[in-house]
Image (spheres, rainbow, N blue to C red):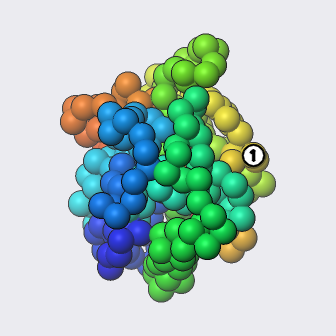
Amino acid sequence: MTSEAFRLLGTPRFGGILVVSDHASNHVPADIDLGIDPALLDQHIAVDIGVEAIGAIMAQRPGIAAFQGGVSRLVCDFNREEHAPAVVPIASDGHAIPGNALDHAGHQARLARFFQPYHAGLARVLDDTPPALILSLHSFTPQLATNDEPRPWHCGVLYNHDERAARIAIPLLEADGLVVGDQQPYSGRLLNATMNRHAEAEGRPYFGIEIRQDLIGDPAGQALWAERLIRICNEVALKVGE
């Protein structure tokens, strides 16, 4: 199952694991001009560096599938509420996105083309093959251009009201010798739109993970984290169902 807005890797299994990556792609369709330096498409404002490859590796294992966004977050940010201004961002980390200064009709067309099919596709996968666990997979930049505050965590675990899986995942990650942020580098109580909609609202166990991008910017780091998350997610899925 694929569309312009998303792709599904692997075969979803009832009681398996679904890895959801809203910001897996930096793709900008040829008929959309964001009006930015193309080099920005390789930076964190356009894509969660490393997560596409990690999800693809994980989806090679039986029982794990990966649902990945098909366009850059600068085209449409799937991890926002549909009516939030930043769903089609006009700026990100100090960079203006002039091509997103759309009129109402243009904004609605962008949502109809990307946002709505993405979330309809994800809902269909979850309804057709309910997983035991959803992993919301993201990555974060070690340094924001607009904020010099250090971001020392190897990864962060995010959640909103439902912290069942997160409370299991955090000590498992720490046992690997990692510096783990609990609701860092930002809080899932503030930014958790996709999981609020598809997990919390439906009572589905999940946790969000943010991995520091310098740790997963190459194939070796991506393979290491994929294997780590396969092991940890399987353990979380078993324990959260007890």
Residue 26: x %, y % from top left:
36, 49
- Camera-nearest residue between 157 and 190: 190
Residue 67: x %, y % from top left:
40, 65
Task: Give the tally of numbered discs.
Answer: 1
Residue 1: x %, y % from top left:
32, 79
Residue 149: x %, y % from top left:
64, 15
* Residue under numbered circle 1: 190
Q: Quadrant of residue 9?
A: bottom left
Question: In the rendered view of the protein, which quadrant contains the C terminus?
Answer: bottom right
Vertical relation: 51 (above or below) 68: above
Instruction: Inspect this view and state whether residue 130 appears.
Output: no
Residue at 33% from the left image edge and 54% from the top image edge: 27
Residue at 35% from the left image edge and 75% from the top image edge: 3
Horizontal arrangement in the rendering, residue 164 relative to residue 131 (left or right): right
Instruction: Name the outermost residue toward the bottom.
Output: 128
Q: Quadrant of residue 197?
A: bottom right
- Camera-nearest residue between 11 and 241: 11
Instruction: Inspect this view and state whether residue 86 appears.
Output: yes
Residue at 51% from the left image edge and 58% from the top image edge: 76
- Camera-nearest residue between 163 and 48: 48
User: How dense is the environment of label 1, judged by Cα within 10 Å: few (below 14), some, or many (20 and up)?
Assistant: few
Vertical relation: 97 (above or below) 127: above
Residue at 59% from the left image edge and 60% from the top image edge: 102
